[in-house]
Amino acid sequence: MAESAKKKVVLLGATGSIGGSTLRVLRAHTDKLELVGVAASSSHHELAAICREFNVANAVLSNEAAYAEAKAANAFPANTQLGCGESALIELSTLPEADIVLVAVVGACGLKPTLAAIEAGKDIALANKELLVLGGAFVIEAAKRKGVRLLPTDSEHNAIFQCIEGHPQQHLDKLILTASGGQFRDAPLASLVNVTPADATQHPNWSMGPKITVDSATMANKGLELIEAHWLFGLEPDRLEVVIHPQSIVHSFAQFIDGSILAQLSPPSMTFAIQHCLLYPDRAPGVDATTDFRNAFQLDFKAPDFERFPCLQLAYDAMRTGGSAPAIFNAANEIAVERFLAHDLAYLDIPRVIDQTLSKVDIAATTTLEALLHTDAEARAVAHSF
Ligand code: NDP
Ligand code: MG
């Protein structure tokens, strides 16, 4: 393939868990993919190393102190342009030479760079779910209007995307998202009162960043993913279901009106979904070994228990209410998890903070982006004051 035919990739969140898996995919496909921009918050040593290894021309550190340190240490290669702050992040997301932006920052801070990238005509590989829960209506509208691809990188949504491709929307009956159930799936309910951040950041199947690992334990993650699926696939809440599947091998199901159900399978590594998005519509050998049916294994499924997972119920309710309710759910959850990780809140207070924030902040039925960002800020303040 000619040098110019390589797909040029911008990676937001290069130093995180998805970022690391993406780098593995990029190393394996240097003939097809080229990294032209990377961003992190404050991990400047790691970001500089990535720039050296991949010869990246554009980098951003959003954290000002980290940016100043990196500048003082002269740590980045001379041919890497280093920027700082939100405006630099937006500039990076709209780089003229970029073809696709992989959004793997954590939290709603991903919304503005993603909208800017779409407006600049970039395809998006979307790992970040919080930004869709906050601003899904605006992201979907902009992507349709600009005719860019919104490729789902979250494993469940990537699975569904692969299952429904080529099928008309009217043939689709419902989507069934699989969930591992996290690390406390079978723990005695009474023991949850003692859960520490160290306990909640260990996942049995997936190696992920701290926020999503806590979200998996509470199943707020599956709640966010239901709302993400609602926006990506245009289905109403009653046609979106969750099933607990402890092995994390079936990544989701699409059920058609005649009762046939399609699934996508692979071991629990994000490289499968990341590579699918970055090479789409092409395919190439993967970087991890896939499921091998010559070795016997079991797949189990069971319905979720809403008493054990109140965050899942709260997410369903917020999705059914619609308007700004999902944005409030997301903001309250982000703050609650941040406070839990800082030992400022008990594990069982996470759903309480979300519930209380949803009851205190006014929910608007329809809204502008500015009003939504205002609601997001208000919900964060309420969640802080719990
Ligand atoms: P991590 O916490 O491991 O990584 C987050 C990355 O984002 C880091 O590179 C971090 O930089 C960077 N970052 C955070 N804030 C900013 C900012 N304001 N500007 C620029 N960069 C920033 O998270 P994960 O990789 O686990 O998750 C990323 C997203 O993908 C989340 O939305 C998550 O829900 C989703 N996701 C993750 C999966 C996984 O397997 N990990 C699976 C499916 C979805 P720094 O290192 O400097 O802090
Ligand atoms: Mg997922």
Image (cartoon, rainbow, N blue to C red):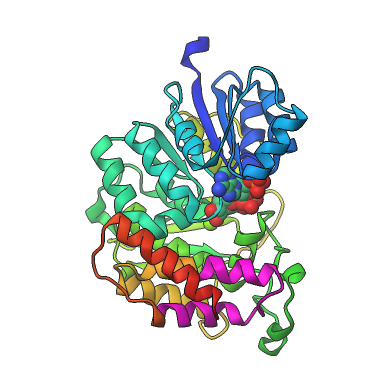
Left of 3 or right of it: where is 17? right
Quarter of the image that includes the C terminus: bottom right
The answer to whether residue 252 shows anywhere in this view is yes
Q: Position of residue 204 (x, y in %)?
A: 71, 63
Q: Quadrant of residue 284?
A: top right
Closer to the camera in the image, 65 or 109: 65
Residue 1 visible from this viewpoint: no
Residue 144 location in percent, x, y?
A: 26, 42
What residue appears at the point 65 percent right and 27 percent down from the top-left corner? Answer: 28
* Quarter of the figure with residue 317: bottom left
> So how many labels did they put on this image?
0
Q: Position of residue 50 (x, y in %)?
A: 69, 30
Which range is magenta?
Answer: 332-358
Residue sitting nearer the eye, 34 or 241: 34
Taking the spot 49% from the left edge, 42% from the top edge, the residue there is 86
Please give the name of the residue rendered at 66% of the width and 55% of the height, measured from the top-left corner.
209
| Location of residue 206 with respect to 332 vertically, above or below | above
Which residue is farthest top? 2
335 falls in the magenta region: yes
